[in-house]
Image (tube, rainbow, N blue to C red):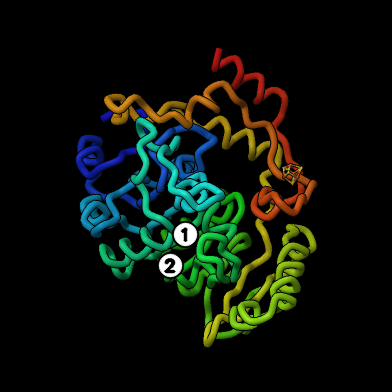
Amino acid sequence: MNELFLPVSREDMLERGWYYYDFLLITGDAYVDHPSFGTPVIGRVLEKEGYRVAILPQPDWHSAEAIRAMGRPRYGCMLSAGNLDSMVAHYTAAKRRRSEDFYSPGKKAGLRPDRASIVYANRVREAFPSLPLVIGGLEASLRRFAHYDYWDDKVRASALIDAGADILIYGMGERAAREIARRLASGEAPETITDVRGTAVCRPDESYCAYEAVSVPSLEEVRRDKRAYAEATRIEYAEHDPVRGRAVTQRHGERCLIVNPPAMPLDTRELDEVAELPFTREPHPMYEAEGGVPAIEEVRFSIIHNRGCLGGCNFCSLAFHQGRMVTARSNESVVREAEKMT
Ligand code: SF4
C-alpha cells in the first residue's frame, strides 16, 4: 500500500508498524486524497494533530465485518456519507435510481447504502458497541434538525437521533473534529462533550445546553403543522450565525436535540494551513484497476479559494452548511498551490 496516503486497512497499518491507531474515519465516497473531499480533510487535520488515523472508504454495509476488520481504534470513529447526500447521489429528482456514481471507482453505482450516515452508524455500533461515535459530512449536517425528506415525502427526525451517534458535527468540521478528538483522547466521555460549537447532541432536556438557546417547534409539531415547520426553519436559518447565533433546541419525543451555535469559520491563516496539508491530490492507488475515481477530474486543476456565501438563496444549501460569512485564503498560499500543480 502507498504510504503517502492514510492507511485503508489493518494490513496497511501493520506495514507501517502501527499496532494501535486512534481514529477510524468512514466515508461513503472512494478515498480521494484531495482537499475537495471532506473525510480526507478531517483525516489530514487529525494527522497533523499527531493522531494515527485510518480511513475506511465505502465499506460493505451488509454486516459489521468490514468495520470490525479494521480493529478498534483507541479514541473513536468519525463517519460521513461522503461529499453528497447519499439520496442525492443515488436518485434523480424524478426518484429514478442513478446508474453511475462519480465518487466511486470506475463510476460504479451501489457502493454505499441509501441514508449512509445512519447505516454506517448502526454497523459501527455493532462492531464496537461502546466506541465514541461522531457523524458529520454534508448529509448529517443538512439533516441536523427535523427535516422534510423529498424521497420519503415526510418529515424525518434529526439524523443524529436516527443514527444513534454521540455527536453530530455540522458545517465545515475542522474545528469541531479537532476539539472532540482532543477531549476524547484526554479520556473525557462523549456524554459530557455537549458544548462544542458546530455540533449537535441529544440529551434529556434543554438544561444540558451550554449556550443561550432558543427552542423551535418539536418534531411532532413540525410533522403535524406546516406553519410550525416554517417557523422552525426560519429560526434555524436565522441562528446559523457564528457571531450572534444562539443554540437551537428541538424536542424529539422524550428527548431534546441541542444544536450548539456554529463554529467560527477558519480564518485566512487556518484555511492556508488546511489547504497545504500533505494531500497527494490523487485517488488511492487501490482503484487503478477500476480506472480511478472520476470525481477527481472536476477538481484536479481546481484551487479552493474561499468558503461561505452571503447569498442565502432558498434553493441552495451552501449557506446552511458553510455559513454566510465569506473567508478566503491568502494570495501567497493560492499561488504556492498553483505552482505545485504546474
Ligand atoms: S446559489 Fe448558493 S452559492 Fe450561489 S449565491 Fe445563492 S446561496 Fe450563494
Element under disc 2: helix
Q: Amino acid at mark 2?
A: Ala
Q: Is residue 323 above or below residue 233?
A: above
Q: Which percent across, then down, holds residue 290?
A: 30, 28
**Residue that numbered label 1 is attached to:** 135
15 left or right of 92 in image: left
Q: Quadrant of residue 240?
A: bottom right
The quarter of the image that holds ligand 1 is top right
Which of pointers 1 and 2 indicates the residue nearer the eye?
2
Q: Quadrant of the C terminus?
A: top right
**Residue that numbered label 2 is attached to:** 163
Q: Which percent across, then down, holds residue 338?
A: 61, 18
Name the outermost residue toward the bottom. Answer: 254
Between residue 330 and residue 298, name the one nearer to us.
298
Q: Earlier in the sequence, mark 1 or mark 2?
A: 1
Q: Label 2 neighbourhood size at 10 Å, few (<14), some (14-19), many (20+)? A: many
89 left or right of 66 in image: right
Instruction: Determine contact: label 1, label 2, CB under 8 Å.
Output: yes
Between residue 225 and residue 172, name the one nearer to us.
225
Q: Which percent across, then down, holds residue 130?
A: 32, 70
Q: Which percent across, then down, holds residue 197?
A: 63, 62
Report if residue 177 is visible in the image: no
Element under disc 1: strand
- What residue is shown at x 74% (from left), y 54% (from top)? 314
Instruction: Using the numbered discs, state the Cα–Cα distance from disc 1 to disc 2 in whole angstroms.
Output: 8 Å
Q: Label 1 neighbourhood size at 10 Å, few (<14), some (14-19), many (20+)? A: many
- What residue is shown at x 35% (from left), y 30% (from top)? 106
